[in-house]
Image: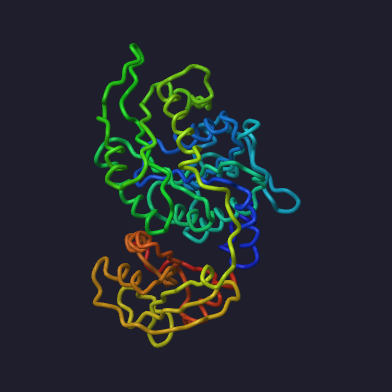
């Protein structure tokens, strides 16, 4: 596993294996949030358990590469994923209906940090989707890290058709505002939103069982109405949730009925009802339109310019990934450099991939909001050579020359 974990993203025949794997999964739910600390992993675990207990065959994938908490919440410390002879990965089944994969089940120690840039994360997520022996699943639940960066972008691009986002917020305005960006992120990537969950919606009193509005309530439901998407319900904050999570036995496993368990049961009914669930995944066709990409590359004197924001021109290269051919190429002069101008302008040009020498984190976030993927650390070469190398899986990203 250690050798294949450190591979850069692949762009060759392995794509077909990825599509075949994802084609065996009927429904894919990406649990996301623009805000950290809203209980997204707790929602992911208990949603997956509730689905499994309802009789569905479920996979739970943890792509929070820097802070994997799924193994702790499920009491899986000490268990390890194993690579098979054919380089596939066997998930760990925690029940007859629930299989789990997390980078926390690979690390030697739970204190080991994962210090990776974007291409490494992309390759790891691709490997989890393509090489894990998920088999035939009714639902794959994906626990994503907060924000709209590398991991959510990678999973949304790779997981294929039939994916929907479950957005988690808490009632306060500061959280709702961040999750509003997640809604925009989904719209930019044409990712359907299954609905919004309002977590920590009131506190269940441990003495009288009544719900006290500690953080107020209604923020998530108001956002769902504003964004014209479904509201999946409120999950109250219950002291038993904290104790069960730390003990590695999520509260959805308990026999005792609680307001939180009832909320998850209602959520499962809503998500799996014929009116809201998607049909089974259909194979992706390899037509020209599906495989066409537009690359934007900052250039000066015919080669990639390392100073992204102040380049002379952008070379827009349209290419077909299926046969790895370049369809067209043109040079465009960018508008005067101001914050936020280039993402909007390149979005208007139809670009969906940027190859750059370097780019700051804030700029990368702005491009993500436009639905444009960014690859940094590319060498100063001719645009057509960079695009061909990318499509062949031979573009080896180096150090981000602009890391602010």
Q: Is residue 131 left or right of residue 379?
A: right
Q: Nearer the viewer, residue 162 or 213?
A: 162
Q: Name which residue lies at 51% across and 47% down.
A: 278
Image coords of residue 319 (percent x, y): 51, 77
Q: Name which residue lies at 30% across and 37% down.
A: 221
Figure check: 176 above or below 122: above
Q: Is residue 13 left or right of residue 123?
A: right
Image coords of residue 356 (percent x, y): 42, 72
Q: Name which residue lies at 71% across and 53% down.
A: 87
Residue 150 location, quadrant: bottom left
Image coords of residue 401 (percent x, y): 40, 69
Q: Is residue 1 left or right of residue 377?
A: right
Count how many numbered circles sit on residues in the image: 0
Give the residue at the far top of this rendering. Answer: 207
Name the image colouring. Answer: rainbow
Figure check: 146 above or below 261: below
Q: Quadrant of the C terminus?
A: bottom left
Figure check: 100 above or below 89: above
Residue 338 location, quadrant: bottom left
Give the residue at the far front of this rendering. Answer: 275
Give the residue at the far right of this rendering. Answer: 85
Q: Nearer the viewer, residue 385 or 404?
A: 385
Q: Is residue 5 left or right of residue 202?
A: right
Image coords of residue 6 (percent x, y): 59, 57
């Amino acid at each position: 596993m250690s050798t294949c974990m450190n591979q850069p993203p692949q762009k060759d025949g392995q794509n077909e294996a990825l599509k075949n794997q994802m084609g065996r999964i009927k429904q894919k739910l990406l649990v996301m949030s623009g805000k950290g600390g809203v209980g997204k992993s707790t929602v992911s675990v208990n949603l997956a358990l509730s689905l499994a207990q309802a009789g569905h065959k479920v996979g739970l994938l943890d792509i929070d590469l820097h802070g994997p908490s799924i193994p702790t919440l499920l009491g899986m410390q000490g268990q390890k994923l194993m690579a098979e002879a054919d380089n596939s990965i066997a998930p760990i089944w925690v029940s007859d209906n629930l299989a789990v994969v997390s980078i926390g089940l690979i690390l030697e120690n739970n204190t080991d940090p994962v210090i990776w840039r974007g291409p490494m994360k992309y390759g790891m997520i691709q490997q989890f989707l393509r090489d894990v022996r998920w088999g035939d699943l009714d639902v794959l639940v994906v626990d994503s890290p907060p924000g709209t960066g590398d991991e959510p972008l990678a999973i949304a691009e790779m997981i294929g058709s039939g994916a929907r986002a479950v957005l988690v917020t808490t009632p306060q305005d500061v959280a709702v505002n961040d999750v509003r960006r997640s809604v925009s992120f989904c719209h930019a990537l044409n990712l359907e939103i299954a609905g919004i969950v309002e977590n920590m919606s009131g506190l269940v009193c441990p003495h009288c069982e009544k719900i006290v509005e500690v953080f107020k309530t209604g923020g998530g439901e108001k956002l769902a109405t504003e964004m014209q998407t479904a509201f999946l319900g409120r999950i109250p904050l219950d002291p038993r949730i904290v104790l069960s999570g730390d003990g590695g036995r999520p509260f959805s496993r308990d026999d005792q009925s609680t307001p939180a368990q009832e909320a998850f049961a209602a959520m499962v009914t809503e998500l799996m009802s014929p009116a809201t669930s998607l049909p089974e995944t259909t194979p992706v066709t390899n037509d020209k339109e599906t495989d066409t990409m537009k690359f934007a590359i900052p250039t000066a004197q015919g080669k990639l310019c390392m100073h992204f924001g102040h380049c002379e021109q952008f070379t827009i290269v349209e290419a077909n990934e299926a046969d790895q051919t370049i369809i067209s190429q043109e040079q465009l002069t960018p508008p005067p450099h101001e914050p936020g101008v280039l993402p909007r302008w390149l979005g208007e040009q139809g670009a969906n991939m940027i190859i750059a020498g370097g780019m700051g984190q804030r700029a990368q976030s702005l491009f993500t909001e436009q639905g444009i993927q960014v690859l940094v650390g590319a060498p100063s070469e001719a645009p057509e050579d960079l695009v061909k190398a990318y499509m062949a899986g031979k573009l080896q990203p180096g150090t981000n020359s602009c890391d602010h």
